[in-house]
Amino acid sequence: MSAISRISSNTPWEPIAGYSRLVRAGDVVAVSGTTATDERGLIVGAGQMYAQARQALANIRTALEREGLAMHHVIRTRMFVTDMGRFAEVARAHKEFFADSPPASTIVEVRRLANPHMMIEIEADAYAGGVTSQQAATKPRAPAKQPKKSAKKLVSKNPARRK
């Protein structure tokens, strides 16, 4: 393994801004600011802070899994939200992903993000603890936790279903 490895999520944003979704330097792993986008770069959960927080965290989990890591390896998160009044929704999503191994965490309100429909962006730092990419590739991984609600319900256009 080289001293520094970089992983892309292949979404449209990375080549535009010139960044990697995840960079690993030895046991230190940094996941770039991650928003609620799907694999094509389209925003999920417009107007729904909880749905966007869950999607951003799921995207972080996917990046970590590509490096053979899991959410319990995360030691710090930084959350940037456009409306601190919706803190409870963000906290709920964050706790669902980290209840068993809570990282150090920060949340701040910002005026806006790269797209006006984005409500949250989350960064994560993780500690790989000596797990190499090669070792992780040969170890069977536990299945990822499935969300309680399907993604389809979270992005529903029906206002009655947005709870």
Image: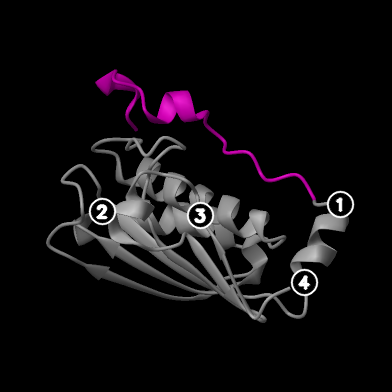
Residues under numbered marks 3 and 1 in contact, where contact means CB atoms less than 8 Å apart: no
Q: Amino acid at mark 2?
A: Arg
Q: Which residue is mark 1?
A: 140
Q: Amino acid at mark 1?
A: Pro
Q: Amino acid at mark 3?
A: Ser
Residue 124, horizontal then vertical, whole percent: 48, 69
Does label 2 or label 4 sit earlier along the sequence?
2
Can I make out residue 113 in this image? Answer: yes
Magenta segment boundaries in residue numbering: 142-163
- In this rendering, the answer to whether 85 lies above or below 29 is above
Q: Which residue is mark 3?
A: 8
Quadrant for the C terminus, please: top left
For image coordinates 35% across by 53% down, the residue present is 15
Residue 132: mark: 4
Residue 62, horizontal then vertical, whole percent: 58, 50
Callout 4: 10 Å neighbours few (<14), some, many (20+)? Answer: some
Q: Quadrant of residue 28?
A: bottom right
Report helix, strand or loop for mark 1. Answer: loop
Residue 155, horizontal then vertical, whole percent: 37, 28
Report helix, strand or loop for mark 2. Answer: helix
How far apart, in angstroms, are the residues tagged by discs 1 and 4? Answer: 14 Å
Does label 2 or label 3 sit earlier along the sequence?
3
- Dominant secondary-structure state across the stretch colored magenta: loop
Does label 2 or label 1 sit earlier along the sequence?
2
